[in-house]
Amino acid sequence: MKMKAMLSSILTIALCLSLIAGSTFALFTSTDKVNVAVNSGKVSVDASYVDGSLTHTSTLGATLPETNVYTDGSTLTIERMVPGDVVTFKIHVENSSDVTAKYRTILECVEDTGLLQGLEITVAGADFVGFACSNWTELKGKEAIADVTVTVTLPEERGNEYQGKTAKFAYIVEAVQGNAKVADFDGANVRDINDLRLLASQVIMGNSYDGATVVLTGDMDLQGKPMLPIGSKGHEFLGDFDGQGYTVKNFTIAKADGAGLFGYAGKASNYTTIANVKVENFTITSNHYAGGIVGKMRGNVNNCSATNGTIVVTPEGENGNYDNGDKAGGIVGWIENGKVEYNTAKDLTISAYRDLGGIAGCALMEGVATSVSNNTVENVTLLYDASGKMYDSDPHENAGKVVGRVVHSSVVVENNTVSNCTLPVVATVTSVNDLNTVLQSAGKGSVITVSGITNDFTLSASVEGVTFVFTEDTTAVISVTGQLKDVTFRGYKNVGYTTAGYQGGVQFAAGSSGNVTFVDCYFAPASGKSGVGSNTSDVAIAFKNCAFVGGRYSFYKSGAPIQALTYENCTFEGISSWIAQTHGGTEPTVLSVVNCTFTNCMGGLFKCGSAYAAGSSFTFTGNTLINTVGHDGKESKFFELNLTNAAKLVENNTLNGAAWAPGAAQGLAGLQ
């Protein structure tokens, strides 16, 4: 049973003309008054398409929208293409003027959201891989070239990964007068973006440039257009490349295996060198081997730079095998038997499942020395994406700020400079062991999704800047003993837990510390329990958009106060005692409740054993109280706090069937 895929692809036929302006010149003699009129010729070479047809061989059934092929005079649109469709048409080129012209044709992919890899395209019987350019050819006036047949096929075996994808191609005719000086790509000097893209297509089609040196003669701006990497698996670039300090910028590359300015370069028996080239403002996506300069390399990468770019390598299943999603580096994805020296990776985001590094994703050697030295990494985010295990064994993320994985101990990694390089993790874990493994590499910005863990567990790691996302009801009680800083629990939901004492579904044990935020969480503890509890004073806790239903407290603290306790846009329903209580100690330095709703709560809001310390603050604004009274039903016990020493802001609160009579002893007189 084939998977259906609905697609829209657009083939644009464009025309680019170079004209000699028509004019008349009068030449006069001083004696005979002979007038000579000279009229210049006009070059006009036109492209059009003819004889379009659609063949549909898919066995997917008649439930799909019917494929449509139409034209508006300048654009041929193939709409709702499905696996098995074959669209064939011819392009007609003729010189409609009366003078000889030189012309060349270019077929290029100008937009692609991932469809190009799924299509099979032939032009005049030759495979089209993303860019094709003919040599300059003479065409006499009123002559036409033989019609060029173009075939666009979406093979029947293509699946859902191509659903909704689009691609746009332009067929361009460039024409100049017949005696104009024009030069085809000579294989040595890359003069413009057409030469650059032609180099890539020629290598993929089998010209390895073995023994040649190719040089960049100027900066190249691709203006956001997609381009092919130079070299592919089995069709490696085997020459040397000298960028001469020039920059290739504003480009996108989407290649399944081997992506970068170069895809595959060098072979075990033929090492190559790429030097002195800069890439800037780029996006590279792949499933295996990706780097700003080169995806997979045997040889040397020296004095190059990759700036302001994104490299994303995502695992994709191939016959049930996921041995990919790796080898991603700011300069090179995979280096073997060569030197990566004096390169710079700056302002990059690199994401992969494993083997990712600021300079190189993976470095190894087979008999020839390999070194990664004297490079610079600056402002690079390495995003370790560990969402699910794609391998039979432990994947080992192998992420490093310079090199992700060093395969052999003889590989030299030295004298590299790193500044502001972070290593966040994106991962989904389904067991406590997986969680602990991932946390070993979780840097700032990490997002860890917790799914299906039902056993109580201890969070003992020291963690900074990590968000834990819970995807379903979590019956586990989480005991926090580690040092936390700027950590967020999102979507945690715990119902009916019966842990001893008042500690709650999340418990901060003695020794834990840091700033913790709960977002979109739901707490419904058993009778007499709390949502969150703490046995340490060294935490600051914030609740945002959380719900507390039943139980005795939303938060409970025994002994000395925590640093800060804030509630924002939270709801409280049916809490039987104090909303929050610090038993036997002073209140936190900051206590803030903003835009919350209290319904049928029979306890007071806050209780504390002592007065607020000087310099502390208390805020209670914009809240709604419905059928809610003070502790033991007494109005005077709504806030059992001594706020005399605190800065206070209590305003814009709404009472609906609620009893609230804060007294002067609480320091609230005249503020309610």
Image (tube, helix red, strand yellow):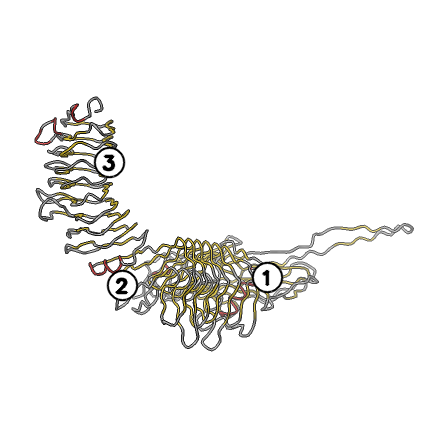
Q: Classify the position of the N terminus by image quarter.
A: bottom left
Residue labelled with disc 1: 217
In three-dimensional space, the C-alpha distance between marks 2 and 1, rounded to whole angstroms, equals: 46 Å
**Whether label 1 touches label 3, CB < 8 Å:** no
Picture coordinates of residue 28, whole percent (x, y)? 85, 50
Q: Which residue is mark 2?
A: 389
Report the mark closest to the observer, 3 or 2: 3
For label 1, the SS is loop
Image position of 528 (left or right of 226): left
Whole-number angstrom distance, CA of label 1 to CA of label 3 = 63 Å
**Left or right of 661, for residue 5:** right
Disc 3 on helix, strand or loop? strand
Front residue of 9/283: it is 283
- Numbered disc 2: secondary structure: loop
CA gap between label 3 and label 2 equals 43 Å
Lower sequence index among marks 3 and 2? 2
Q: Nearer the viewer, residue 178 or 68?
A: 178
Q: Residue furthest right?
A: 31
Picture coordinates of residue 261, whole percent (x, y): 48, 62
303 relative to 593, above or below: below
